[in-house]
Image (cartoon, grey):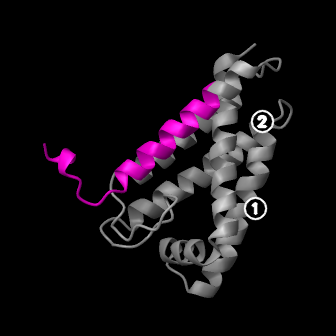
Amino acid sequence: MSFAGDSIALFLALVLLSAAVQKAFQQDRMAAAAARLAGTGTGFGKALAAAAGATEFLAAIALLFAATRPAGAAIAAALWLVYAVLLVRRRGEAFDCGCTFGAHAAAPRVFAPARALLFSGLAIAAALLPAGAWSPEPLFAALALFSLQSAAGELAAIPHPHWRHA
């Protein structure tokens, strides 16, 4: 059994599923973020956000099965790499990048592109690590990692917290 590979794959599937659900339920916000990131109009932003959400959903499902995990991981790695590049291109511009659950109109700092690059690297690891027989432990590890990364993302989105300067 590959505890690490299964945990990483499940964690990334959770991240991708939450991103796809966010795009489905916050369509206008995600369309505006996609348009701003890509440097296009809002109409094309809607299509980009919908395509990204569908791709995230398919990659997440693929990560859940051993036979399709490498393909899902490759798609996820490519998505996050493109996202990181787009965030770096827009560095210094204040806008809601869609990086968090709530709207935050601030310039994307180091955290968002670094997180996307980390996820891309984890996806590559998930593609290379073997899948194991099902057990509940990787699911619990994935849920814990998902909770931690969600909290870290929300903390990083605070514009000027006093504890950053303490």
- Residue type at numbered disc 1: Ala
- Residue type at numbered disc 2: Arg
| Mark 2, residue position | 69
If the image is split into quadrants, where does the C terminus sit? Answer: top left
Crowd around label 1: few <14 · some 14–19 · many ≥20 (10 Å): some
Residue 143, above or below 46: above
Q: Which residues are magenta?
A: 141-166
| Mark 1, residue position | 54
Q: In this rendering, would 57 be left or right of 145?
A: right
Q: Residue at x 63, y 86 (%)?
A: 43
The numbered mark, 1 or 2, whose residue comes first in the sequence reads 1
Q: Residue furthest left?
A: 166
Q: At numbered mark 1, what does the secondary structure look like: helix, strand or loop? A: helix
Pinpoint residue 117: horizontal percent, then vertical percent: 48, 45
Q: Quick check: is 134 in the magenta stretch?
A: no
Pinpoint residue 27: horizontal percent, then vertical percent: 64, 74
Q: Residue at x 48, y 55 (%)?
A: 84
